Image (cartoon, rainbow, N blue to C red):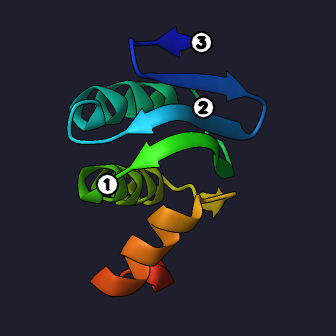
Amino acid sequence: MIQSATYQLAEAPGILAISGALTFATAASALETGRAALGRGKPATLDLSGVTEADSAGLATVLALLAHARQNGTDMKVANAPTGLEALARVSGVTPFL
């Protein structure tokens, strides 16, 4: 498990889970550690059930992780996206990518 002051990234067979805040303050670090985790395996699910706070940078991070997974041959799906993140995706017109 990789942990920062405001978010955690955990790996389990087939799952990459993010919990805590996924915001401007954590997005760059979460993206970097998420890409590293994707390099170690091919999780089928990005579990966001533990995300407590998300903003547009968090949404961009999720989209970038999905794109990175697809570029490396994995069709990773998002599970348990928080309501606020789903609403932001809807307003931004990127819901189909989640």
Kindly check if marks 2 and 3 are in contact, taking CB atoms under 8 A apart as contact.
no
Circle 1 SS class: loop
Q: Residues within 10 Å of mark 1 (few under 14, many from 20)?
A: some
Which mark, by number, is residue 41? Answer: 2
Give the amino acid at mark 3: Met
Up-down relation of residue 20 to residue 55 (above or below): above
Which residue, given by chain and number where applicable, does mark 3 sit on?
A: 1
Image spot of residue 76 (x, y percent): 60, 57
Mark 3 or mark 1: which comes first in sequence?
3
Q: Residue at x 65, y 42 (%)?
A: 43
Up-down relation of residue 65 to residue 35 (above or below): below
Q: Is residue 75 visible?
A: no
Give the amino acid at mark 2: Gly
Which mark, by number, is residue 55? Answer: 1
Q: Residue at x 46, y 76 (%)?
A: 87
Instruction: Single out the mark in the foreground, 3 or 1.
Output: 1
Q: Residue at x 55, y 35 (%)?
A: 18
Circle 2 SS class: loop
Q: Nearer the viewer, residue 35 or 78?
A: 78
